[in-house]
Amino acid sequence: MNKKTVRDIDVKGKRVFCRVDFNVPMQNGVVTDDTRIRAALPTIQYLMEQGAKVILASHLGRPKGKVVEEMRLNAVAERLSELLGKRVVKTDEAYGDAVKAAIAEMNEGDVLLLENVRFYPGEEKNDPELAKAFAELADIYVNDAFGAAHRAHASTEGIAHHLPAVAGFLMEKEIEVLGKALSNPDRPFTAIIGGAKVKDKIGVIENLLDKVDNLIIGGGLAYTFVKALGHEIGKSLLEEDKIELAKSFMEKAKEKGVNFYMPVDAVVADDFSNDANKKVVNIDEIPSDWEGLDIGPKTRELYRDVILKSKLVIWNGPMGVFEMDAFAEGTKAVAQALADAKDTYTVIGGGDSAAAVEKFGLADKMDHISTGGGASLEFMEGKQLPGVVALNDK
Ligand SMILES: Nc1ncnc2c1ncn2[C@@H]1O[C@H](COP(=O)(O)OP(=O)(O)OP(=O)(O)O)[C@@H](O)[C@H]1O
Ligand SMILES: O=C(O)[C@H](O)COP(=O)(O)O
């Protein structure tokens, strides 16, 4: 990465505004998955050890510029205190005089967590005044929020124009892993793209077709491709206006010598429910009243084989409606194949694929699970992430 990191600056005795992505799931005021908090610990602990005064900032949810009580960061501060083994002071605002007073009390190595930055309308608008107000709190800016790096907001982008601005370790690792995959991949390089809609994955498929050896398609979006081949797909998900695009992707793959893998069979159901009647059919035999909700057993075998022969695999998007046990087998089979592929470097693009790998208890078998859903997707589309661009060059 050509951006400066926390290693390149002296933080001793300095007030460091560290943007993290603590946008974690919560239920009844308790953090139910602390993965993103744990992922930020190396940077936080490093700053503490170096004698910085660590001021953490994050968003949680989408409160749309207003205070939403359930989206306060108190429970996050508690969980972070437990993980650090040290009390984390939490302020009820994210800038202003009360916050400045709390910071003035800090000693070297102390950690303070600001209130949810999205309680202020200026955050998502990247308001220069709010960016300045954040910058006034600190001497140095560290961005470790890879998950929010695709957002040009006051705490992810604007503030970087007012202070020395460097990346944290999580940001550095995410950019290095994903960057190497896209610029200098070990081969064979396979991308697995699933999820609900073609529309959401157009940019990724387009960009990856120039880079991969194998492209595997699954999930709801596969049916638009099946339709493009001229098969009937019953009530399966279809984006009528993307059929031509699907055809052009398949043609482009052929021109580029990319192996394009599509489901050869499907688990179809007579209803979108876990208790629906279901059966396995060949992909060109989907009955008109049924819908495809998972890849079938032959497809699972085929995809497993491709995965095991790859040196690098990137996976984004489930193979079926994995939230329902009846249609989770395809997604599980892909996760299991990745876990079994010992000589393969496996990268999970965040969001639903990361959730699936967690659900099946296979997270620790993957080489890299990105903490960013939208951010990793935009990175894989080849887009520049504003939160990274704004940091100081090496
Ligand atoms: N065959 C299918 N029919 C209908 N829905 C499907 C099918 N296969 C997968 N899905 C649904 O697609 C959803 C995930 O799609 P999405 O495009 O959001 O994936 P993602 O990119 O992994 O998610 P994220 O945006 O969180 O990163 C899941 O909720 C899953 O149930
Ligand atoms: O969960 C995420 O993907 C990040 O925290 C970004 O959240 P956002 O999509 O609400 O900007």
Image (spheres, rainbow, N blue to C red):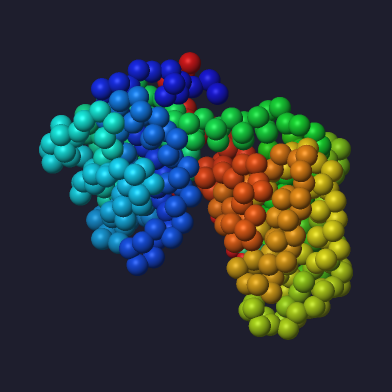
> Residue 245 vs residue 70: left or right?
right
Asked whether the viewer can see residue 17, the reply is no
> Residue 350 vs residue 204: left or right?
left
Residue reaching furthest front? 85
Residue 129, x across and y down, in percent: 23, 34
Which quarter shows the N terminus?
top right
> Residue 174 vs residue 202: left or right?
left
334 above or below 28? above
The answer to which quarter of the image holds residue 383 is top right
Number of labelled discs?
0
Which residue sits at x=74%, y=63%?
330
Residue 40, x across and y down, in percent: 44, 40
161 above or below 38? above
Q: Nearer the viewer, residue 338 or 290?
A: 338
Which residue sits at x=28%, y=38%?
111
Which residue sits at x=71%, y=27%?
184
118 above or below 29? above
Residue 60, x across and y down, in percent: 36, 52
